[in-house]
Amino acid sequence: MKEFQLIENFFTNRSISRRDVELSIGDDCALVQPALNKSIAISCDTLVENVHFYPDIPPQALGYKSLAVNLSDLASMGAEPAWMTLALTLPDVNEQWLTEFSSGLFDAAEYYGVALIGGDTTRGPRSITITINGQVSTGKALTRGGAKNGDWIYVTGTIGDSALGLDVIRGKRHVDPEHHEYLVNRHYYPTPRVLAGQSLRGLASSAIDLSDGLASDIKHMLKRSQVGAVIDVNRLPISSAVTDSVSKDEALNYALMGGEDYELLFTVPEAQKGALETALANAGVQFTQVGQITTGDSVKLIRDGERFISNNLGFEHFS
């Protein structure tokens, strides 16, 4: 199957239609018309086989997750998803694999209103690169750089599920059957907190999505904001699937260092705490206060009033 036939069979006719797309797949460039007084939020992620995913990942899960991790970046900025491009590198043309991969990709795209407007295919080691574009009212985007001393630190959802789910998939952990499907799906099918991110506009002083683990990701926020933080590890939101499956210390390490949760970590000034309750309740998202911003430039983990030390450094892309 030639490149253009591959694109047409599996991608061109699957994309949703958007009024702001003037010209889509089939030309040298796509043309889009941003809304008035909107800034464009742009993010790009590459997933490489044997680095970011294993060869035996279900293709449908890979298609879904490839877009979900990009949507999580938009969520952390409070942006509304709009358009994407896809660069797909494959060792060969496997029609069954492409059918399942594109199904997962477009399941996510249709749910979040994202139009595929272009991309490329080539032969080589399997990798997926998606560039996602979203829109946010000018001056209203959330960033990593606004946290102030005294702001409260929150996390959406639960954390540590994805990392334990990966260990279950790889056979490194065995869990009760009642937790198995939940943990595996939390790794394969993360939920980008798009609506929660939009609800935080005007309330949160800073935000970041949790891709590399809380202990690693919060350092990026602190560096950009030029502040420090105290995190009470006893307050970390950990699911019963994790706490029922491993020891308390192991659960904390999964929550702090595991990565790929794609929840939101954000800060809120004292004056906005009441409004936050209403905003995220309307968004239907669980959230937990886990610490507070301080002066300084480092993060301090505490447990029962004492410093908590972990021997795990978190996820590193080049480790």
Image: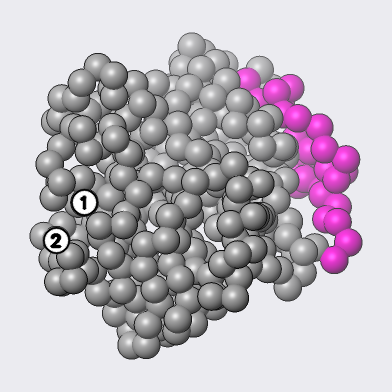
Label for residue 103? none
Figure quadrant of the C terminus: bottom left
Classed neighbour count for the residue bearing mark 1: other residues with Cα under 10 Å, few (<14), some (14–19), many (≥20)? many
- Out of 214 and 66, give the one closest to the viewer: 214
Q: Amino acid at mark 1?
A: Leu
Q: Which residue is mark 1?
A: 252
Q: How many marks?
A: 2
Evaluate whether residue 40 shows in this view: yes
Q: Which residues are magenta?
A: 10-37
Q: Residue visible at 41% across and 42% down? A: 47
- Out of 106 and 11, give the one closest to the viewer: 106
Residue 62 x, y percent position in the rendering:
44, 30
Q: Which residue is mark 2?
A: 310
**Left or right, 281 with reference to 309:** right
- Marks 2 and 1: CB-CB under 8 Å? yes
Classed neighbour count for the residue bearing mark 2: other residues with Cα under 10 Å, few (<14), some (14–19), many (≥20)? some
- Give the distance between the C-alpha atoms of the residues marked 2 and 1, in whole angstroms: 9 Å
Q: Residue visible at 29% across and 19% down? A: 178
* Residue 127 position by quadrant: top left
* Residue 171 position by quadrant: top left
Tag in front: 2 or 1:
1
Residue 235 covered by magenta stretch: no
- Out of 102 and 301, give the one closest to the viewer: 301
Q: Secondary structure at mark 2?
A: loop
Q: Residue furthest front?
A: 274
Q: Residue visible at 32% across and 30% down? A: 183
Q: Amino acid at mark 2?
A: Ser
Residue 233 x, y percent position in the rendering:
25, 60
